[in-house]
Image (cartoon, rainbow, N blue to C red):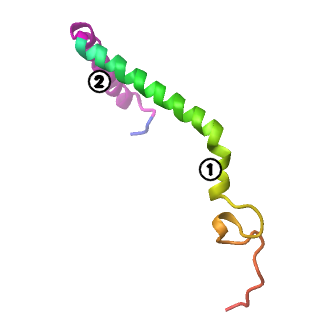
Amino acid sequence: MELGDPQLLSPLLGSVLGVCADFGRDWESNDLRAAIFKLLLAWLLLSLTAIQLAWRSYGPTVNGLYYRQGMGGQNGGTAEHPAAYPAW
């Protein structure tokens, strides 16, 4: 069976829709669970926004610490231009 096979996609789509329907019924019946979900979702979005803003401010500094420019190469390990090593 290939990935685009209708025989494979139909049961998969049906199970995904079933899970979504169960989630919707559970969402409507349980206010506490919905409130916790909203709180955790807001916390996740706030955290991702803070990470994005911090990376925008400090990203170049962090990159400068770990990626050296010039003859030392990345992390001082390999040179940008290989030296003339004798053949083994």
Q: Does the segment drawn in magenta span residue 19?
A: yes
Q: Secondary structure at mark 1?
A: helix
Category of crowding for the residue at label 2, using alpha-carbon neighbours closer than 10 angstroms: few (below 14), some (14–19), many (at least 20): few
Q: Is residue 17 visible?
A: no
Residue 38: percent from the left, percent from the top?
Answer: 36, 17
Q: Quadrant of the C terminus?
A: bottom right
Residue 57: percent from the left, percent from the top?
Answer: 64, 38
Give the CA distance from mark 1 to mark 2.
Answer: 44 Å
Q: Which residues are magenta?
A: 4-31
State whether residue 45 is above or below residue 31: below
Instruction: Looking at the picture, tell me which residue is in the foreground, 11 or 25.
Output: 25
Residue 70: percent from the left, percent from the top?
Answer: 77, 65
Residue at 40%, 27% (x, y): give it.
Answer: 6
Q: Look at mark 2 in the image and give the residue it sits on.
A: 15
| Mark identifier at residue 62 | 1
Q: Amino acid at mark 2?
A: Ser
Q: Answer with left or right where residue 50 lies relative to residue 13.
A: right
Q: Amino acid at mark 1?
A: Val
Category of crowding for the residue at label 1, using alpha-carbon neighbours closer than 10 angstroms: few (below 14), some (14–19), many (at least 20): few
Question: What is the magenta segment's predominant secondary structure?
Answer: helix
